Amino acid sequence: MSLPRSRFSRRHLLALCTFLVPLAVLALLGQNVLRRQGDEIEAGILSEARLYLENARSTVEQQIDRIMPDLVAESRNALADLGPVRAALQLREQERYAALLDVIVLDEQSALVWPQPPPTTMSLAFARDPRGRGPESGISRGLNWVDLLLTKGRFEEAAEFLEFLIGEIEKADEQRAGYVLARFRLATVHRRLGQLAPAAAEFEYVRDRVFPPGGQLSRGFDYLGLMSETALAEMGGIDDRIDLMHRMASNPRYAGVADDLLTAVVERLVEEIVAVTGDQEPQRDEALLLLREERQRAQTRRFAGAYDAILKGYLRRVLLQVPADEEPPPDAQIVATLGRSTTMLWVRDATEDERDRYRRAARIGLHVDLGLLLAPALGEFIATDSPFALAIHDPDDEPLVAPPATVPTDYVAPSADVRGLRLEVYPADAERLVAEADSRLRSSFVLFAALFVAAFAGALWLWRSVNREAELASLKVDLVSRVSHELKTPLALIRMYGETLLLGRARGEAQAQQFGGIIARESERLTTMIQRILDFSRQQAGTLSYSPTRVELAPLLHRICDAYTPHLEVRGAVLSDMVNVEATVICDENACESAIVNLLENAAKYALEGDDDQEVEVDLRIDGDRAIIEVRDRGRGIPAAECDQIFDPFYRATNSGEVRGAGIGLSLVRHFAESHGGGIAARERDGGGAVFRLTLPLAGTVDGAPIPALAPSTT
Ligand code: ADP
């Protein structure tokens, strides 16, 4: 009979619940605490960030309000007195207005009155395709020839050829573009040859053709005119040069010339003036001032180009939104990215003086570099020890101050708009925040992993111990019921035959003897049984001990066979003593005898039903350092799957049928064998039946000690 199998019972459920429910509650609480912690940190950061943002917003606003109204006011006087170039230069000299870049003048429609934007393409009317047909191509070929002569340094020949070419063109049509160019070349060749008077005459001719005094200027040859004027100034004195620079600064007839060329010419003139004049010469300062003005003018003209292309339309839309009847006259501001810097264009109404000075002037624009304007105020926000980083974007989303490179993934930056700028606040040390979030995630993972492992291990342990408890409880019940069952039968027989004898009911001496024999056999059986139960309970309690001695196995086995042959015969078994080798072992002789008797009894007990002539063999062999005692029968055998289990306490094979038994005998045999360093195994026998093999170490092979003391052990 098998032990009770572990099943899921209410006991299990209860035990698991008392363990798992608090664990789950713990997990939930832990998770909540972690989440709350995270939320609190995030909320704290967010509220600090908002405070920081508000601070930044008002700082930006204050900085603009601190500088711009003053700048606007001062620009009114400066512009009327000095004009836009000098006004911009002079205002910028003050540190607080360092962000002012340009001053421009606009008309009612916001179109540029001053400056004119630079020409988008340079007019090259003289540079016709030399492969083209017609008289122009003839001039071009002639000029190419001149170039060749000049590169070879044949200046006189070049001059002669140019005079010839000019004569030829005059005969045809002197208005042709190549004619002016030829005269200009002739002028430069004369100059190179040191023939200054004819050179000046030629340069003057070209200048007057390009910039006719008081007349229409001839577009397309502006650069030739400028180069001629420059050459004339260079051939004159310092005053001529300064005079030319003045004219270039104030005369709109140079507007068609590319800014870079104008600036380059002024730079060259100034270089020469500085080289010629001493440190103290007033012309030198004047020249340097003119150079600064020229650079400012060129810069403002470049801005004018951007204004025309990008800002004009935008400004018109903004102006439409400004209520016109406000006092004082409304200003408009637009913020945009030009090139790589963020620009603010502050537009105010023109004063009466300004309107007088510039025809059509209606508004004045102050072009300010916003980054420069805000930089002094933003210092504290850009400080490295600040916990936050400020990012500023203009309306085109271009960063005026870029956000930090690392931003936590789920971070939504608090933002505020001020004067067309969008401010955003980011944590300065995003890596620390990310690391903290990661560590919170890790903690919660570790918490869950630990709880899961604890839950799993605990549940397993609980399950096993509840099972074990259930098994033990059922073992006890089993032991009591089996033992009482086992004891009942012999007791009943003893009582029955005893009473029969007592009442003198035995028929004759022989029957009385037979009944007496039965009583004696059953009593012996009872004694053996009780001895086994006692041994078993000692074994379970761990107090079963043995008294080992040297035992000659062959004589012991012969003796057992002799003594038990009659017993077995009564049970219908024939015992064959096949022992014919000698073997000495060290063991408890009585325990050894009990074990072998147990095997013999079982062989008789589990005979096939109806087989009254079963042969049981007892054999002894030596295998290496071990003695092997085998008990073989031809009984019902043991199912292969149960060959190991039958040695477990209370286990009875499924084929034991009606045969009485408590299932403790073999567990005692195993305990005996293992306690002596041996073993016991069972298997099916070929041809039917069972083979039990008890192995014991031969004397002298256990640690060299002749008689080891055997400690009590439990199975
Ligand atoms: P019991 O014989 O009192 O049941 P044991 O511990 O001696 O207890 O034997 C355990 C079980 O092993 C038996 O119930 C029986 O099923 C099986 N068994 C033991 N010896 C034999 C055998 N010789 N042939 C078949 N089965 C056996």
Image (cartoon, rainbow, N blue to C red):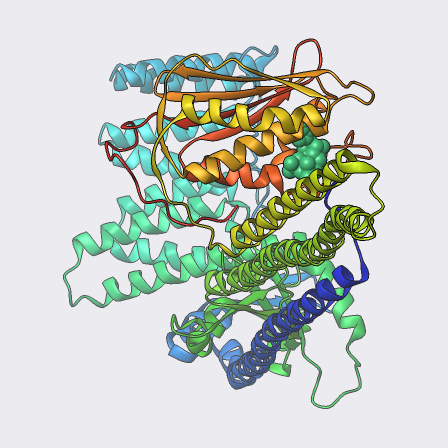
Where residue 423 appears, x then y in whole percent?
Answer: 60, 70
Identified at 55% across, 83% down, the residue is: 55
Q: Quadrant of residue 632?
A: top right
Where residue 158 appears, x then y in whole percent?
Answer: 32, 17
Q: Is residue 155 left or right of residue 470?
A: left
Q: Quadrant of residue 247?
A: bottom left
Query: Along the line of sight, which residue is nearer the eye, 641 or 499?
Result: 499
Q: Quadrant of residue 182?
A: top left
Q: Is residue 240 left or right of residue 518?
A: left
Query: Along the line of sight, which residue is nearer the eye, 35 or 242?
Result: 35
Identified at 38% across, 22% down, the residue is: 626
Identified at 40% across, 62% down, the residue is: 293
Where residue 259 appears, x then y in whole percent?
Answer: 47, 48
Q: Is residue 358 visible to us here?
A: no
**Quarter of the rendered structure image containing ligand 1:** top right
Relative vertical location of residue 348 with respect to residue 578 in this rendering, above or below: below
Where residue 516 appears, x then y in whole percent?
Answer: 71, 42
Position of the N terminus, as image quadrant, is top right
Q: Is residue 376 visible to us here?
A: yes
